[in-house]
């Protein structure tokens, strides 16, 4: 039940308040980064402090008031929102540390702007996580698109500007063309504030054809989820510095996309109502197509970050496919995969950045023998690859088991096979990299005797996130409990 609280406001506001401090301390980088860390730890603390109330069945709530009659801007924290907020706020801490090592090690410019936009984007992410209704979610979804644009175009060259234009064209274009009209029609049909409800606020208020059209508009309109054909912004955004790639692929942007899709299925329509109408199959097959095709494309990519980007497209489609199956275990598996994939994929991007900082290598074909000189980095890469593939002892195995279990419960054995085939493809594009790094010698005669690991501020975060993927295998209880609240809210 809703409980009035200032904690959602504080968790959202703290990173915004850090922005003036970051800007004022632009000439004192150590103090500037201290402001970032203080905000990150405070944000995580405020989010964590809501855990007991949410697990006890409460929903901390804060209202900014009505923007228009019947359209409030409001936060309400449930199990799904808190699970996402814990992941995003926790990983912001290690990503901030990594960003210091990377940005300084690579000699990147405009670091003050980078950290300021980073903070704003985390505030937008919290806004999405805590949204009580569809209007609030839409406002912060758009805020996230705009605040991450300067991060994507950070380098300011032609490639960065092109990638940035693609980024905004896809994300703003789809949300305005698809989500906005769908939201307005939903407001008309709901006749109220569009609050997310366990049974869906549109349940029994739309018929089958209406529901199918709305479902497709929302699913493809939230293009941060990366479903084909609205996915190409994601690999094009790889022109950004690696900490931005980590933010895009693990902490905030793409996870906001799939989070919004889960909200649509569970809070706008309700899984029981969608099962009754039998319209979710269209999303299931679009997601299955994306899973397989993106995995095949990843196999062909020599650029390491682009290979990771297409892997992310496929893993996001896992989450969409899982929730579209409408079976409780599959929905829970989708929620779990948000966190499990976040830890595994952020580890892989951290490793890619560390390799670039240490020796300037960006291509898979250049990595022969590098594991001997960078054992911590490539060891962490192997653990991240195991998690994304779904191998023990990493958290990725647990979410994939639930996704497969849910597909079996739904009787969708063809779609179940998509999960299995994709896992084989995951191994096919990840583990040759590990083999190259540790067991091959450079064909061009390059030696790595003088090469060392990247700066400590790069290596420590990737080590911590790699350890985190293993810890989640043995201690996943919090995420199981929070995700179960969505399946059985009462």
Image (cartoon, rainbow, N blue to C red):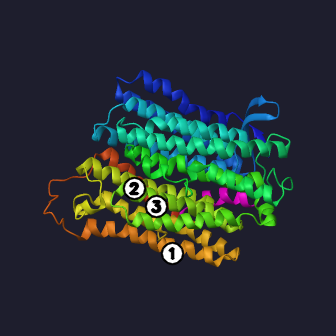
Q: Earlier in the sequence, mark 1 or mark 2?
A: 2
Residue 67 x %, y %: 75, 29
* Label 2 packing within 10 angstroms: few (<14), some (14-19), many (20+): many
In-front residue for pair 405/269: 269
In-front residue for pair 182/193: 182
Residue 69 x %, y %: 82, 31
Residue 422 x %, y %: 50, 71
Residue positioned most to the top: 24
Magenta residues, dominant SS class: helix
For residue 311, the mark is 3
Q: What secondary structure is found at the residue carrying circle 1?
A: helix
**Residue ID for mark 2:** 306
- Compared across the picture, whether 369 is left or right of 63 comes to left
Observer able to see residue 26:
yes
Q: Earlier in the sequence, mark 3 or mark 1?
A: 3
Query: Is there a contact, CB below 8 Å, between mark 3 and mark 1?
Result: no
Report the magenta residues as a range.
474-488
In this rendering, the answer to whether 282 lies above or below 9 is below
* Label 1 packing within 10 angstroms: few (<14), some (14-19), many (20+): some
Res 434 → quadrant: bottom left
Residue 126 belongs to the span the image colors magenta? no
Give the CA distance from mark 1 to mark 2. 21 Å
* Label 3 packing within 10 angstroms: few (<14), some (14-19), many (20+): many
- Compared across the picture, whether 223 is left or right of 429 comes to right
Give the CA distance from mark 2 to mark 3. 8 Å
Residue 358 x %, y %: 25, 49
Residue at image position (69%, 60%) is: 484
**Residue ID for mark 1:** 421
Q: What secondary structure is found at the residue carrying circle 2?
A: helix
- Compared across the picture, whether 179 is left or right of 339 comes to right
Give the CA distance from mark 3 to mark 1. 14 Å
Observer able to see residue 133:
no
């Amino acid at each position: 039940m809703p409980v009035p609280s200032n904690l959602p406001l504080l968790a959202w506001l703290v990173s915004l308040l850090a922005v003036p401090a970051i800007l004022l301390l632009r000439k004192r980088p150590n103090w500037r980064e201290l402001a970032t860390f203080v905000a990150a730890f405070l944000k995580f603390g405020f989010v964590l402090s809501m855990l007991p109330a949410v697990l006890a069945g409460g929903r901390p709530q804060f209202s900014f008031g009505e923007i228009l009659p019947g359209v409030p801007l409001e936060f309400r924290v449930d199990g799904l929102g808190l699970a996402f907020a814990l992941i995003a706020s926790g990983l912001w801490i290690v990503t901030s540390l990594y960003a210091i090592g990377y940005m300084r090690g690579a000699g990147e410019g405009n670091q003050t702007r980078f950290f300021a936009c980073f903070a704003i984007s985390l505030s937008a992410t919290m806004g999405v996580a805590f949204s009580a209704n569809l209007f609030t979610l839409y406002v912060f979804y758009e805020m996230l698109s705009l605040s991450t644009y300067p991060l994507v175009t950070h380098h300011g060259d032609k490639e960065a500007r092109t990638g940035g234009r693609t980024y905004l064209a896809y994300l703003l274009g789809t949300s305005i063309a698809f989500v906005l009209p769908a939201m307005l029609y939903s407001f008309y049909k709901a006749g109220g504030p569009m609050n997310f409800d366990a049974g869906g606020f549109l349940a029994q208020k739309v018929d089958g054809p209406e529901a199918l059209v709305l479902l497709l508009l929302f699913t493809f309109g939230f293009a941060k989820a990366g479903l084909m054909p609205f996915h190409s912004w994601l690999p094009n955004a790889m022109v950004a510095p690696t900490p931005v790639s980590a933010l895009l692929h693990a902490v905030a942007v793409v996870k906001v996309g799939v989070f919004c899709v889960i909200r649509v299925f569970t809070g706008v329509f309700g899984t029981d109502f969608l099962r009754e109408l039998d319209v979710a199959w269209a999303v299931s097959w679009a997601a299955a197509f994306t899973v397989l095709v993106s995995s095949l494309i990843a196999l062909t990519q020599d650029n390491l970050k682009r290979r990771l980007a297409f892997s992310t497209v496929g893993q996001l489609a896992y989450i969409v496919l899982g929730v579209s199956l409408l079976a409780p275990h599959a929905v829970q598996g989708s929620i779990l995969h948000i966190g499990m994939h976040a830890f595994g994929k952020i580890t892989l991007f951290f490793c890619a950045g560390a390799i670039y900082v240490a020796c300037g290598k960006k291509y898979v074909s250049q990595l022969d023998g590098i594991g001997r000189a960078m054992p911590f980095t490539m060891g962490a890469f192997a653990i991240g690859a195991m998690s994304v593939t779904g191998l023990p002892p990493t958290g990725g195995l647990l979410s994939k088991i639930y996704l497969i279990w849910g597909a079996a419960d739904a009787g969708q054995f063809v779609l179940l096979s998509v999960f299995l085939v994709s896992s084989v493809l995951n191994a096919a594009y990840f583990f040759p990299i590990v083999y190259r790094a540790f067991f091959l010698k450079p064909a061009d005669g390059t030696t790595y005797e003088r090469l060392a690991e990247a700066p400590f501020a790069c290596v420590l975060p990737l080590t911590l996130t790699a350890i985190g993927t293993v810890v989640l295998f043995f201690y996943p209880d919090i995420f199981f409990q929070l995700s179960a609240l969505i399946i059985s809210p009462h």
